[in-house]
């Protein structure tokens, strides 16, 4: 159980299944993109690299998207918003995507054997996918600008809860037990995170309440996008 992108130790992930969580908002946005027919998402470290790599691909099937400190990047086609992605025409598109926390965590997870994208909207499906791999599972929370994020920790705890339902003899570390306690406190009323999670409050104050609401829904999809470092793309769940 890792609380922030900065705390990921790539060497510890070898041979493991990793679930990357950035509830507000990258994970939820990625899942929404595939629900909208997106072909692939390429996680990129910074905006300049996203522009360069997108510009090197011929055709009109390429978009740039992302944010820095919650704000859309000037000149990009899309921000980091599940509401915006949900209204976009993404069939067959490849999106070059860079965010403050979520894509950093995905890139840090490259050493894992398998990497899935998890959020509240797909938490049960993501846990089932991770359990089905037959490997040790690392849950990597993106956090918020270097600090742990309550919404990510809550989601991580709900992943643990679902994993225990499938693998009751699983051995939990201290972080997993703490996250589980947090997840169970919020499980029956995720809307409390609107006021309790600092990043949720900041997004609401910035006029992005609809995004927060979209991200704080539980199990609305069974999609589990997977990051495949060998092709440097996030791809949709083949189910």
Image: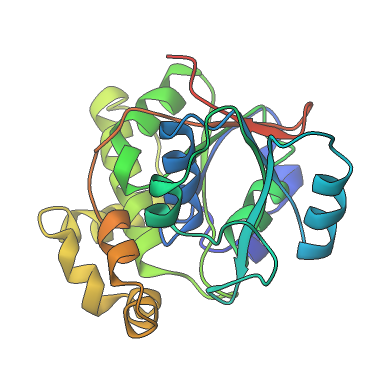
**Percent x, y of residue 173:** 44, 48
**Percent x, y of residue 213:** 25, 61
Report the side of 91 relative to 156 (left or right).
right
Front position in the image: 231 or 146: 231
| Residue under the point 28% across and 46% down | 158
| Residue under the point 73% across and 39% down | 110
Residue 170 in sight in this render: no
**Colour scheme used in the picture?**
rainbow
Where 209 falls versus 190 (above or below)?
below
The C terminus appears in which quarter of the rendering? top left
Front position in the image: 178 or 71: 71
Can you tell which quarter of the image residue 98 is in?
Answer: bottom right
Q: Residue furthest front?
A: 60
**Percent x, y of residue 96:** 70, 47
**Percent x, y of residue 126:** 39, 32
Can you tell which quarter of the image residue 229 is in?
Answer: top right
Where 159 falls versus 7 (above or below)?
above
| Residue under the point 43% across and 17% down | 132
Can you tell which quarter of the image residue 32 is in?
Answer: top left
Residue 186 in sight in this render: yes
């Amino acid at each position: 159980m890792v609380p922030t992108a900065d705390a990921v130790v790539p060497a510890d992930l070898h041979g493991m299944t990793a679930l990357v969580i950035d509830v507000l908002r990258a994970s939820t946005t990625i899942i929404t993109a595939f629900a909208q027919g997106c072909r692939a998402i390429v996680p990129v470290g910074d905006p300049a690299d996203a522009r360069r790599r997108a510009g090197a691909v011929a055709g009109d099937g390429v978009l740039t998207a992302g944010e820095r400190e919650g704000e859309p990047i000037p000149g990009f086609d899309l921000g980091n918003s599940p509401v915006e992605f949900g209204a976009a025409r993404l069939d067959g598109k490849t999106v070059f995507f860079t965010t403050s926390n979520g894509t950093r965590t995905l890139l840090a997870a490259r050493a894992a054997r398998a990497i899935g994208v998890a959020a509240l909207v797909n938490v049960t499906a993501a846990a089932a996918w991770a359990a089905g791999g037959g490997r040790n599972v690392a849950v990597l929370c993106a956090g918020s600008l270097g600090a742990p994020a309550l919404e990510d920790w809550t989601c991580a705890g709900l992943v643990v809860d679902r994993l225990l339902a499938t693998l009751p003899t699983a051995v939990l570390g201290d972080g997993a037990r703490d996250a589980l306690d947090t997840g169970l406190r919020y499980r029956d009323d995720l809307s409390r995170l609107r006021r309790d999670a600092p990043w949720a409050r900041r997004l609401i104050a910035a006029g992005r309440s609809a995004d927060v609401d979209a991200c704080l829904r539980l199990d609305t999809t069974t999609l589990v996008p997977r990051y495949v470092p060998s092709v440097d793309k996030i791809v949709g769940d083949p189910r």
